Structure formats: C-alpha cells, structure tokens
Image (cartoon, rainbow, N blue to C red):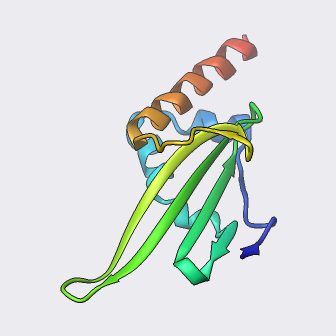
Amino acid sequence: MKENKENVKVLTSEDILRLSNNQKRLDFLNEYESWGTWLEIPEINVKVFKAELPNEEVIFVTEFNRDSVMTGEIKSAAYRYGKDCEDYRRYPENVSSIAERLKNLKMTILKEKK
C-alpha cells in the first residue's frame, strides 16, 4: 500500500464558490483523477483519491480497475463523503448526492460571508 499525503486536493471556500452550478460540481467530481492518487494498493488494482473541503469534511473516491477479456480494462469508482478517514459512509453515495452536498456547502459559505 502506497500513501502519498501530498496528493490531496485541498479546496478553499473560493474554490467551492467557483463550483457555481450543478454541471461544474459534477465535472469536479468526475475529474477526480486530476486530484492525484492519495492511496494506491497495486496488489488489488485500487486507487483512492481524496479532496479536503473547507468545512473539514472529505470526499474519497475509490477507483477499482480490473481487466476483462471481452472489453479490456474496466474502471469503476465509489464516492464517499465524510468528516475524516474514520468517519465516512461505509456504502458509496452517488455523484449527484455529493454534488448536492457541495451545493449546500456553497450556500453555507455564502451565508457566512454576509
């Protein structure tokens, strides 16, 4: 298992405000590979990507790679949202629900700025 603590996407309040619509939030989540690999387990073809939010919550994306004789490599990703490594949802959430959480965070930030 290889952990790279430097490969953590750290978002500021301004970054969250720039995710101004649902499409931008979905794009950010779907482009998780650009965050950098935080944890890799090559023995089982798993990579974990991590984004830290300004409210001290975290998004983890676990990518599973497997080879298929018929289609070549198959990637699937599981998204989880939580407060830290020990406190995240055991079962994955869909991307839309995490995008909604980002929207709510944006609204909270805007309220705090007023």
Going by the picture, which residue comes out furthest to the bottom? 69
In this view, 39 is above or below 68: above
Quadrant of the drawing holding the C terminus: top right
- 45 on left or right of 60: left
- 105 on left or right of 73: right
- 102 on left or right of 24: right
The residue closer to the viewer here, 79 or 112, is 79
Rendering quarter of residue 21 = top left
Residue at (73% x, 47% y) in the render = 85
Residue at (68% x, 22% y) in the render = 109
The residue closer to the viewer here, 91 or 81, is 91
In this view, 42 is above or below 56: below
Rendering quarter of residue 33 = bottom right
Rendering quarter of residue 57 = top right
The x, y position of residue 98, in whole percent, is 49, 36
The x, y position of residue 7, in whole percent, is 73, 66
Going by the picture, which residue comes out furthest to the left? 70
Going by the picture, which residue comes out furthest to the right? 5
In this view, 49 is above or below 114: below
Quadrant of the drawing holding the N terminus: bottom right
Residue at (70% x, 66% y) in the render = 38
The residue closer to the viewer here, 68 or 97, is 68
The x, y position of residue 77, in whole percent, is 44, 59
> Tag count in the figure?
0
The x, y position of residue 8, in whole percent, is 73, 59
Residue at (47% x, 44% y) in the render = 92
